[in-house]
Amino acid sequence: MNKVYVGSLPFSATETQINEMFAKYGKVNSVNIITDKFTNRSRGFAFVEMESEEAAQKAIAGLN
């Protein structure tokens, strides 16, 4: 699976910052920060979709 769960994010984290963090390990297809539907504030986690399984595994290993 090419989608990676990213937890414990600061509420101020942006899609651009997360993209830059993961781009070191391969091409990032998308970043989806999960927000509260009532306040529209970040819930502190996101999903990052990488282009390949290999890139996703490198990112997991490199960022843990």
Image (cartoon, grey):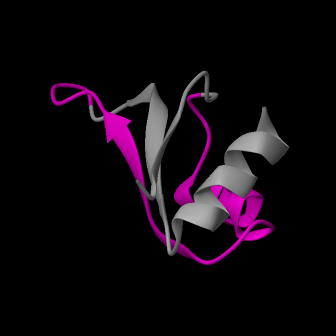
Rendering quarter of residue 42: top left
- Residue at 61 percent across and 29 percent down: it is 9
Question: Which quadrant would residue 28 be assigned to in this image?
Answer: bottom right
**Does 60 appear in magenta?**
no
Residue 25 position within the rendered picture, expressed as x and y whole percent measured from the top left? 76, 66
Q: Position of 19 compared to 49: left or right?
A: right
The front one of 26 and 9 is 26
Give left or right: position of 1 versus 13.
left
Percent of width and height locating residue 47: 43, 46
Quarter of the picture holding the C terminus:
top right
Residue lying furthest left in this view? 38
Q: Is residue 16 visible?
A: no
6 w.r.t. 28: above or below: above
Q: Nearer the viewer, residue 41 or 49?
A: 49
- Where residue 37 appears, as percent x and y from the top left, is 17, 30
* Residue at image coords 71%, 70%: 23
Q: Judge from the rendering whether residue 62 lies leftward or rightward of residue 8; answer left or right.
A: right
Residue 13: within the magenta? yes
Number of marks present in the image shown: 0
Q: Is residue 31 left or right of residue 22?
A: left
User: Which residue lies at the image location 45% right of the left edge and 40% below the top edge?
Assistant: 46
The residue positioned 64% from the left and 28% from the top of the image is 10
* 52 over 34 or under it: above or below: below
| Relative to 53, residue 18 above or below | above
x then y, percent, for residue 49: 45, 61
Instruction: Specify start and end residues of the magenta stretch as a single range.
Output: 11-39
The answer, for residue 9, to whether it is visible in the render is yes
Figure quadrant of residue 39:
top left
